[in-house]
Image: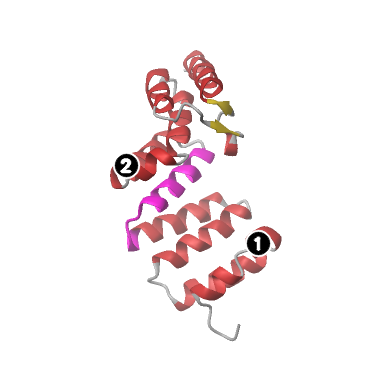
Amino acid sequence: MGNEATHDEIDRQFHLLRTDPEKFLQLTNALVDQHPNDAHAYFVRHQAWKRLGQPDLALADVDRSLALKDRYNVHEARGLILHGLGRYPEAIAAYDRAEQMEPTQWQGGFGPLFRADCYARLGDEAAALADCDTMPDDHWTPGLFGAPAGTKQDVAAELRSRAAAARRKG
């Protein structure tokens, strides 16, 4: 690779994120060092931090990426990190921004599922089910990152359960 990390090199080495995340982090660190005003460099590096179990560092990189360039997918990534940290109101705000920026893409992705889960965990069953209602009728998910799993009906039932549990705690 030489001394310079490039976006092409990162793309060629993306498999390292799964096979050798420490090496991938080294590559992305080099990219950030060489291109400190490149929003994409920080976004790519956040994935290494997430893989290595460093959500706070991943969040810092996502925030830096957003400060450099406001992008839909980065807001979604921010929401996912915050969801994982249990910072549900902040995650909802990130998901809201993503939806505002790209409403069509938003509807086709996992954002509504994760925002619904955030609402449910805060005890807001109505908002959770409103997001669930926007999902396609043939929706199915394996339950990624702690979100409800199954069909749309399974997800709705789990959202109701989580919202009720949150209200009991609250």
Q: Where is residue 108 in the image (x, y as percent from the top left)?
A: 42, 40
Q: Classify 10 Å Cα crowding around label 1: few (below 14), some (14-19), many (20 and above).
A: some
Q: Where is residue 61 in the image (x, y as percent from the top left)?
A: 46, 59
Left or right of 41, for residue 10 = right
Extent of the magenta region: 67-85
Please identify the dominant SS of the magenta region: helix
Can you tell which quarter of the image residue 123 is in? top left
Can you tell which quarter of the image residue 19 is in? bottom right
68 magenta-colored: yes
Looking at the picture, tell me which residue is in the foreground, 31 or 148: 148
Q: Which mark is residue 103?
A: 2
Q: In terms of secondary structure, where does tag 1 sit? A: helix
Q: Position of residue 75 (x, y in %)?
A: 39, 49
Looking at the picture, tell me which residue is in the foreground, 157 or 81: 157
- Which quadrant, please, contains the N terminus? bottom right
Residue at (53%, 83%) from the top-left corner? 4
Task: Tell me if residue 111 comes above or below residue 154 in the rendering.
Answer: below
The three-letter amino acid code for the residue at tag 2 is: Pro
Q: How far apart are marks 1 and 2 (CA)?
A: 33 Å
Nearest to viewer (mark 1 / mark 2): 2
Q: How is the image coloured?
A: secondary structure
Left or right of 94, for residue 30 = right
Q: Residue furthest front?
A: 138
Q: Where is residue 60 in the image (x, y as percent from the top left)?
A: 45, 56
Q: Residue furthest bottom?
A: 2
Residue at (47%, 33%) from the top-left corner? 113
Residue of label 1: 21
Looking at the picture, tell me which residue is in the foreground, 63 or 24: 24
| Disc 1 to disc 2: CB gap under 8 Å | no
Q: Classify 10 Å Cα crowding around label 2: few (below 14), some (14-19), many (20 and above).
A: few
Task: Tell me if residue 136 comes above or below residue 53 in the rendering.
Answer: above
The three-letter amino acid code for the residue at tag 1 is: Pro
